[in-house]
Structures are given as C-alpha cells and as structure tokens.
Amino acid sequence: AQSVSQHNHHVILSEAASLELGCNYSYGGTVNLFWYVQYPGQHLQLLLKYFSGDPLVKGIKGFEAEFIKSKFSFNLRKPSVQWSDTAEYFCAVKDTDKLIFGTGTRLQVFP
Amino acid sequence: DADVTQTPRNRITKTGKRIMLECSQTKGHDRMYWYRQDPGLGLRLIYYSFDVKDINKGEISDGYSVSRQAQAKFSLSLESAIPNQTALYFCATSEAGFTGELFFGEGSRLTVL
C-alpha cells in the first residue's frame, strides 16, 4: 500500500519568509498526490492536487507544489508566508479508493 | 449550513460507555469515510463506505463499528470506549468516481476518561 512521510513536524517562520514543506511517497508508478490544510479549529480542506501533466501544481492562496518523480517527492512551497497561513498541513496520496495521509506539519507564522 | 455535519461536536465520556458519532451530508456523495486525528499521527482511516451495502475496514477499525443508514448518513460507534480512543474524529465524503478530493465535516472531539 502507498504511504507518505512528512519530515517537518513543526515549522516556525516570520511573515514574508519562504516556505517549503517536505512530502515523500512510498513507491512509483502512477500517483495522485494532494496537500490539505487545516486552519485552527477548522476542518481539512483541499489546497492543491496532482494527477498528471505539469509537475508544478498551483493551488489556492499562493501555494504551489512540485512533483519530482525521481525523488518520490511532492513538496509544498510558498514564496512569502502570511500570519494567516498558520495551520497544519497534510500531504496525502491516493491508494485505490481511499486517501492515505501523512502525519502533518504544523506551521506557525509570526508577524 | 455545512455540507457535512457531525454530531456531537464535543463529547466527554467514561471508560466502558457506548458512544455513537453521527455524520450526515447534503452533497449527494456516495462515498463516506471516518478518520481519527491524533497529534503527531495525522489522520488514520477507520472505516469507509461506498454505498449503503458496501462497508470496508480501514487501517484502525478495531474497537469501532459503523452503520450506513442511508446514502446521506454514516455513523461511527465505540461499543466500549477506552481512553486511547480519545481523539478528534472526522467524517468525510467523496464522489463515486473517486478523485481523491474529500469533503470534511467539522470534527467531533471525543474524550474518554
């Protein structure tokens, strides 16, 4: 079965800093990858997704992710974070008929 | 109104009690899921259902049971709650042609003393 790993458990940044959160999936072949975000006290919502095609995927709120097949990676990036980006971020991979989530990365952005 | 509604939102109970968490959706989706979220462990799948007659175990189904009463309703039960079932529980839905996009409820925080 597929799995994903997120190595950054807690990231602290100042506003305007650049962000990169790591995500690695377990094996190759066709993969569908996702980033979900959970703002404090809220439910998870989809940030962006990759199915095929252009490996650079753009999502909501200025986030993007790059699929690098040779590295089994799907890292999330944002050039300049804002305080409102404080949230928990989950990478996920589609495994047949379900989603498998990573352990999450908690991002704190200070003004 | 939320498309995916969970009740109760918060519940404190004692070890050994039976607890039911309910989920209803107005999105018209066929597929429904129950996940639990624990700090440092992310979200783990408990059960999922493709329709009323199709229920599947996830990675951590022990100690839980589910009921799909209708297309729009999917309940999670803890027959005899134990403290390590203290967690945040999320219900989610998806379309029949599963693309990987899940629509989550607001969550049910359960504390077992």
Image (cartoon, helix red, strand yellow):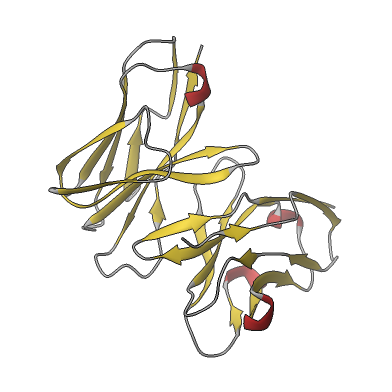
In the rendered view, tell whether residue B48 sits above or below residue B12: below
Q: Residue B11: x and y, percent?
A: 43, 20
Looking at the image, which residue is at 40% across and 17% down? Answer: B81
Q: Residue B57: x and y, percent?
A: 32, 44
Observer-nearest of B6 and B113: B113
Q: Quadrant of residue B7?
A: top left
Q: Residue A86: x and y, percent?
A: 71, 51
Task: Judge left or right: residue B104 versus residue A90.
Answer: left
Looking at the image, which residue is at 62% across and 49% down? Answer: A103
Observer-nearest of B19 and B56: B56
Q: Quadrant of residue A65?
A: bottom right
In the rendered view, tell whether residue B107 sits above or below residue B3: above
Task: Judge left or right: residue B5 versus residue A10.
Answer: left
Observer-nearest of A33 and A4: A4
Looking at the image, the residue that sits furthest to the bottom is: A53
- Whether residue A63 can be seen here: no
Looking at the image, which residue is at 51% across and 11% down? Answer: B113
Q: Residue B41: x and y, percent?
A: 60, 42
Report the number of discs: 0
- Whether residue A21 can be seen here: yes
In the rendered view, tell whether residue A91 sits above or below residue A72: above
Q: Quadrant of residue B15?
A: top left
